[in-house]
Image (tube, grey):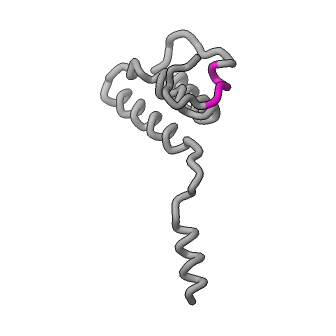
């Protein structure tokens, strides 16, 4: 019985590794709300994107391009595939 309770608690706990998926989803949700409110894209989005891992960054960029919110210059392959930057300053 105790073992079953421990297994249930372990399965219910959030993952210990942060994949960045939550941060990417939060950026998409914020951009969606801005789009629905008729607001322009936040000018600090580049900093937020650089803080994401490449997979999350690409996910958000694809969403922004398809929604029409990101219409400026594109990101180079080096920028897309760069590791997550803690301060978002870039290269």
Residue 80 to residue 10: above or below: above
Location of residue 30 in the rendering, given as x and y in whole percent from the top left corner: 39, 34
Q: Residue 89, relative to residue 9: is it above or below?
A: above
Whether residue 68 is visible, yes or no, is no
- Where does the image place residue 21, in percent across and percent down from the top left? 55, 43
- Percent position of residue 73, x then y: 55, 10
Quadrant in the rendering for residue 39: top left
Q: Quadrant of residue 55?
A: top right
Q: Quadrant of the N terminus?
A: bottom right
Q: Residue at x 55, y 33 (%)?
A: 52
Count of numbered tags: 0
The picture places residue 34, in percent across and down from the top left corner, at 35, 28
Asked if residue 44 is positioned above or below residue 17 in the image, the reply reads: above
Identity of the residue drawn at 30% across and 28% down? 37
User: Of residues 43 and 85, which is closer to you in this image?
Assistant: 85
Q: Which residue, as the protein is rendered here, is positioned at the far bottom?
A: 1
- Residue shown at the point (52%, 27%) measured from the top left: 49
The residue nearer to you, when weighing 25 against 86, is 86
Q: What range of the chain is rendered magenta?
A: 79-83
Q: Main secondary structure of the magenta part?
A: helix
Residue at image location 56% in from the left, 78% down from the top: 6
In the foreground, 70 or 52: 52
Residue 81 magenta-drawn? yes
**Is residue 60 rendered magenta in the image?**
no
């Amino acid at each position: 019985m105790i073992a079953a309770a421990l297994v249930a608690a372990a399965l219910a706990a959030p993952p210990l590794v942060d994949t960045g998926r939550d941060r990417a989803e939060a950026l998409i949700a914020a951009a969606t709300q801005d789009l629905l409110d008729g607001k322009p894209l936040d000018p600090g989005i580049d900093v937020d994107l650089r803080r994401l891992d490449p997979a999350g960054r690409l996910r958000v960029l694809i969403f922004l391009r398809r929604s029409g919110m990101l219409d400026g210059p594109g990101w180079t392959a080096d920028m897309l595939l760069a590791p997550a930057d803690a301060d978002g300053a870039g290269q």
